[in-house]
């Protein structure tokens, strides 16, 4: 790591690699100790570099948190941006659960801690507010398109459905943290999404996501 951290700033590829490693080390430290108890010294120690070396890439811990959130947001977009014409709306939400609902409770603990901190930290709050806005608007747009295609019931406003799904997902993070088994949460998630979207309990046989929606692919 020292070799990468010491590379000249004018070489973009090395700078990006250094930032990626710092973010990873920062997340590992915060998963272990929480946001408030993690210091830049802790992160530097994990990388075996001096603390001043970190400040070449991030002014403070808040900047590091925001950068890590951007990476996680990019992972979510990879799930939801898959363009499949026969993509089942329930299957998309199951994929979101499978890929974003980590089995590591410390990840959810950190997220909930950051939710609380955002009330007092303007930098984190501003980013979190924008992230939540996008986290509602994008699903709402997808749901509206699915309603127009007849894949989802039109009885409920798409923004209402999006807010319900985002709220339930974050609520399940807390439930996982408090001991509810992930397998049960996944099964309830499928049932709830089906109910909200007005999708029948049994998929048509030609549905590409039939096995996954029916619970055959528990992860």
Image: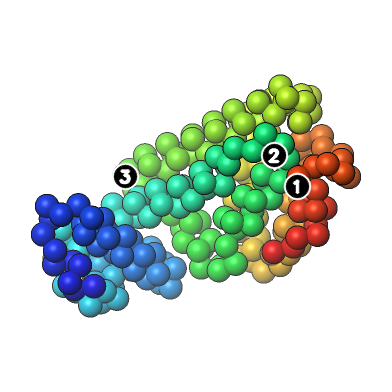
The answer to whether mark 1 and mark 2 are in CB contact below 8 A is yes
**What distance separates the C-alpha of mark 1 from that of mark 2?**
7 Å
Q: Is residue 142 left or right of residue 4?
A: right
Residue drawn where x is 80% and y is 59% of the image: 216
Q: Which quarter of the rendering shows the C terminus?
A: bottom right
Residue 123: image quadrant is top left
Residue drawn where x is 76% and y is 53% of the image: 212
**What distance separates the C-alpha of mark 2 from that of mark 3?**
37 Å
Percent x, y of residue 12: 20, 52
The answer to whether mark 2 and mark 3 are in CB contact below 8 A is no
**62 relative to 164, above or below:** below
Q: Which quarter of the rendering shows the N terminus?
A: bottom left
* Residue 116 in sight here: no
N-terminal of the pair, mark 2 or mark 3, is 2
Residue drawn where x is 57% and y is 62% of the image: 102
> Which residue is the site of mark 3?
123
> Which residue is the site of mark 2?
87
For disc 1, the neighbor class at 10 Å (few under 14, some 14 to 19, many from 20) is some
Q: How many labels does the image show?
A: 3
């Amino acid at each position: 790591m020292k070799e990468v951290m010491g590379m000249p700033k004018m070489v973009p590829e090395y700078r990006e690699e250094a930032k990626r490693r710092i973010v990873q080390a920062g997340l590992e430290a915060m998963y272990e100790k929480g946001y408030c108890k993690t210091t830049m010294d802790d992160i530097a120690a994990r990388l075996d570099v001096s603390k001043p070396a970190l400040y070449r890439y991030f002014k403070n811990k808040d900047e590091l948190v925001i950068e890590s959130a951007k990476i996680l947001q990019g992972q979510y977009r990879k799930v939801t941006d898959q363009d499949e014409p026969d993509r089942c709306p329930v299957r998309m939400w199951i994929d979101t659960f499978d890929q974003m609902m980590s089995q590591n409770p410390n990840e959810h603990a950190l997220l909930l801690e950051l939710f609380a901190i955002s009330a007092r930290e303007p930098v984190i709050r501003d980013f979190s507010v924008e992230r939540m806005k996008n986290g509602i608007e994008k699903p709402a747009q997808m749901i509206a398109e699915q309603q127009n295609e007849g894949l989802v019931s039109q009885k409920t406003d798409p923004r209402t459905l999006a807010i319900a799904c985002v709220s339930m997902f974050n609520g399940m993070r807390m439930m996982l943290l408090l001991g509810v088994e992930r397998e049960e949460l996944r099964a309830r998630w499928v049932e709830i999404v089906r109910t909200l979207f007005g999708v029948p309990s049994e998929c048509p046989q030609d549905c590409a996501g039939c096995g996954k929606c029916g619970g055959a692919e528990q992860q």
